[in-house]
Amino acid sequence: MSHTEYAAVSTSLLIRKWDADQADFVLRKAADDAALRLLRAGGHVTIRPELFEHYGVEPFEVWQRDNVNNVLQAGWVALLGGIAGTSITNKFSGTNGRIGVGTSSTAVSYTQTSLQGDTGGASTTSYYKLVSGAPSISTGSSPPTLTFTSAFGTGVANFAWNEFGTDNYTTDGVTTQSLGASYIFFNRGVVTMGTKASGQTWTATETISFGYPSGSGTVS
C-alpha cells in the first residue's frame, strides 16, 4: 500500500448581513464619534465590520459555507513563484486586495481570470470591494490560514451573490478587465449566498486553509 500526502486547500466563506436601519444607526452614531476618526475617509465615515461590532449591532443573518473555493492558475503562480520562482509585483496587503462577488453560477475553471458575472467596465452583475485591512496570516498551528475581509456598503453589489473571488487590485470597481500585467485573480468559488438589497450592508470574510489539520495527509 502506497502512502500519499496531499496538500489540500479549502476556504470557509462567512457572510454577515445588516439591513438598512442597522447601517443607518451605526453611521449616525459614528458620524460624531471622535474615537472613530481613523475610520473616516474624505470627511465621511466608511462602513467597516468593526463599526457594527463597536456599537454592538448584530447582523440579521449570518451565513457560512466551507470548501467552496478553488485557487486558480494565477493564484498558484503567485504562491509557488514566491517560493521558487518570480514573486508577484503587488503583494496582497491592506491597500492591494479586493473580494469580488457576482451573479454567475458557471462552474469554476482553473484558467479563469475574473468572475463570470464580470462583463467589463459597465458591469451590473459584478463588484469588487477593497479589503477592510491587511490580510491576516496565521502559521502558528496547522492548518495555516490566510484571511481576507471586505465590507459591501448600502449602494453596491445589490444583486444575487452566486460567486466570489479575490484579486490584488487597489480600488473598488465592477471589473478586473484591463487592469494590467500586475493584476492577479487568485481564487474563485461558486455558491448561492443570497440576494443583497439596496440599503443593506454585507461583509464577506474568506479564510483559506492550506494543508490537513493533522498534518498526516491521506492513505491510498
Image (tube, rainbow, N blue to C red):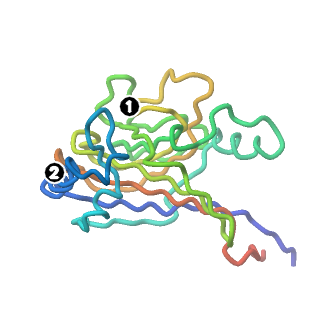
Of residues 210 and 188, the one drawn nearer to the viewer in this rendering? 210
Give me the disc on residue 28.
2
**Location of residue 17 (image quadrant):** bottom left
**Where in the figure is residue 22, as x and y percent of width and height?**
17, 58
Residue occupied by mark 1 = 173
Query: Which quarter of the rendered picture does the N terminus lie within?
Result: bottom right
Q: Callout 1: few (<14), some (14-19), or many (20+) C-alpha neighbours within 10 Å? A: some
Q: Is residue 41 above or below residue 152?
A: above
Please report the residue visible at 74 percent of the width from the left and 37 percent of the height from the top: 87
Give me the disc on residue 22.
none
**Location of residue 115 (image quadrant):** top left
Looking at this rendering, what residue extends furthest in the right direction? 1
Query: Which quarter of the rendered picture does the C terminus lie within?
Result: bottom right
Please report the residue visible at 70 percent of the width from the left and 78 percent of the height from the top: 214
**Quick one: SS at disc 2?**
helix
* Left or right relative to 90: residue 131: left
Q: Callout 2: few (<14), some (14-19), or many (20+) C-alpha neighbours within 10 Å? A: few
Of residues 28 and 7, the one drawn nearer to the viewer in this rendering? 28
Q: Nearer the viewer, mark 2 or mark 1?
A: 2
Please report the residue visible at 48 percent of the width from the left and 66 percent of the height from the top: 66
Q: Amino acid at mark 2?
A: Arg
**Where in the figure is residue 76, as x and y percent of width and height?**
68, 45
Q: Is residue 127 above or below residue 64?
A: above
**Where in the figure is residue 192, as x and y percent of width and height?**
35, 56
**Where in the figure is residue 131, as x and y percent of width and height?**
45, 45
Please report the residue visible at 27 percent of the width from the left and 45 percent of the height from the top: 153
Q: How many marks?
A: 2
- Whether tag 2 and tag 1 are in contact, CB under 8 A, the answer is no
Q: Amino acid at mark 1?
A: Gly
* Left or right relative to 18: residue 216: right
* Left or right relative to 39: residue 27: left
